[in-house]
Image (cartoon, rainbow, N blue to C red):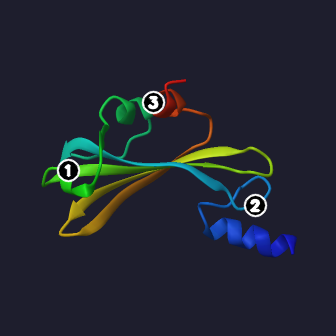
Amino acid sequence: MGLFKKIQGFFHDDWCSKCQSEMHENLRQLYALPVMVDQYEHQEEVEYFTGRMQKVGSKAEIPSGMYACDVVAYQCPACGYKVVKLTVFLPVRDQEKFEDVYFFEKGELDRFLWGN
């Protein structure tokens, strides 16, 4: 059974990488990233996102040609492990052209998301 959970965890973002339990989604929020088409570059610093992301209620609020970020915060109910997944995409005609996916495991976005 443990091997099966490890395999599942490898293919699912919402499975804990520490204990292979299914994690709970604590937060899901959409943000506009005011960067126009062809101007986005892969980023290594979390400050790039925290200094630019603007909370929006839906994709319809994101101006044409501007990137967006889908942020999902997970926590494992078994061991308490936390991770935030940030997906950068370009909304194009009701579809999403994915650019990057980042995982933050050290609380890098906590202050931005919860004001901690």
Name the amino acid type tagged 1. Ile
Q: Name which residue lies at 19% across and 50% down.
A: 61
Measuring from the top left, give residue 100's x and y in whole percent: 40, 54
Q: Which mark is residue 62?
A: 1
Q: CA distance from mark 2 to mark 1?
A: 35 Å
Residue 90 location (% of width, % of height): 25, 58
- Please state if 47 lies on the left or on the right of 15 as rendered: left
* Up/down of 27 relative to 89, above or below: above
Q: Of residues 86 and 100, which is closer to you in this image? A: 86
Q: How many residues crowd around disc 1 within 10 Å: few (fewer than 14), some, or many (20 or more)?
A: many
Residue 21 numbered mark, or none: 2
Tell me the quarter of the image containing the N terminus.
Answer: bottom right
Instruction: Give the amino acid type for the residue marked by disc 3 in the picture.
Output: Phe
**Image location of residue 7, percent across then percent down:** 73, 72
Mark 2 residue element: loop
**Tag 2: residue type?**
Ser
Residue at the spot 25% in from the left edge and 47% down from the top edge: 40
Quadrant for residue 31, please give it: top left
Residue 112 bears which disc, if any? 3
Q: Could you classify mark 2 by the number of other residues whose Cα lies within 10 Å: few (under 14), some (14-19), or many (20 or more)? A: some
State the separation of the CA atoms marked 3 and 2.
27 Å
- Circle 1 sits in a helix, a strand or a loop, which is it? loop
**Which of the two discs, 3 and 2, labels the residue nearer the N terminus?**
2
Mark before the other along the chain sequence, 1 or 3: 1
In the picture, measured across the screen, residue 19 lies left or right of residue 34, that is right
